[in-house]
Image (tube, rainbow, N blue to C red):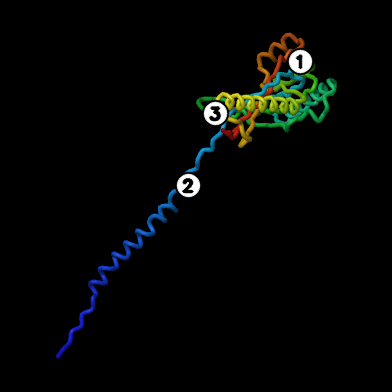
Amino acid sequence: MIHVVRFPLRRAARRRPVLLAAALAALLPATLLMAAPARAETPAGIHVSGTGEVLVVPDMARLTLEVRREGTDAAALKRELDAVTEAILELTDELDIERRDVTAAAVNVYPRYRRHDDETVPDGVVASRTVEVTLRALDDLGTLINGALERGANGVNGVALDASNRAELERRALDLAIDDAKATAQQIAGRFEVTLGALVDASAGGQTPQPLRMAGMAEMKAADSAFSPGEMTIRRDVQATFSIRP
């Protein structure tokens, strides 16, 4: 007699998907918890800004004088620029401007072109140089500009007014900005009947000095008179966040 033994293969095959599904179901909540990003809560607080301004009459200036010549002989043009630059340096000596406050750049030479028969053809060279001056006696600004033009400078590229004690004035403006921010935060806390807490975060910014307009320099040259710069505003801004307590 032949005995046939049947192994329960099909039953085992059926159990595997069930066991796998159960295992996945058990792991799924943990997987979702790991994948879900933590949601950052915005901390309760009072966010304010403050501004501090200090008015000051400028007492110094930084300006750039331009010397420019055109021709066909680059070497001759350089010699002419050197002569004009030396005359400007003598002028700064007459005005008691220290040499550390005067910077003469290197001569820049580049070709000049013109149009001829619908073509661009060489037409000599251009030589230029700039002289940067820090003037600490603002009353001499008109004398310096006019004297430089009389000695061969072609023009003034720009004048920026400033205060010699700018660092001190910026600190004073920053103090005012902080006081402004704190006062605003205290007013908001008082009106909402909460207690102002500790400082959480703060940042500060500033403002650069305003340049002198070219029109003012043209009038100064024509009249050869004293120059009145008016007032300059030095400003600092503050942003701050304070915690609150009920």
Name the residue tied to disc 3: 120
Can residue 157 be seen in this snapshot? no
Q: Residues within 10 Å of mark 1 (few under 14, many from 20)?
A: some
Element under disc 2: loop
Q: Quadrant of the C terminus?
A: top right
Residue 142 disc label: 1
Q: Residues within 10 Å of mark 3 (few under 14, many from 20)?
A: few
Q: CA distance from mark 1 to mark 3?
A: 41 Å
Residue 245, x across and y down, in percent: 58, 34
Which three-letter amino acid code belongs to the residue tagged 2? Answer: Ala
Name the residue tied to disc 2: 38
Which three-letter amino acid code belongs to the residue tagged 3? Answer: Thr
Q: CA distance from mark 1 to mark 2?
A: 65 Å
Tell me the residue at 20%/80% (across/down). Answer: 6
Which three-letter amino acid code belongs to the residue tagged 1? Answer: Gly
Element under disc 3: strand
Relative to 201, is 54 above or below? above
Can residue 238 be seen in this snapshot? yes
Q: Are marks 1 and 3 in contact (CB under 8 Å)?
A: no
Residue 34, x across and y down, in percent: 44, 53
Judging depth in this view, the residue of 57 and 40 nearest the camera is 40
Tell me the residue at 57%/31% (across/down). Answer: 46
Image side of residue 224 versus residue 116, left or right = right
Judging depth in this view, the residue of 166 and 129 nearest the camera is 166
Tell me the residue at 66%/17% (across/down). Answer: 213
Judging depth in this view, the residue of 132 and 39 nearest the camera is 39
Determine the image quadrant of residue 91.
Answer: top right
Residue 115, x across and y down, in percent: 55, 25
Q: CA distance from mark 2 to mark 3?
A: 66 Å
- Point out the frontmost of discs 2 and 3: 2
Determine the image quadrant of residue 87.
Answer: top right
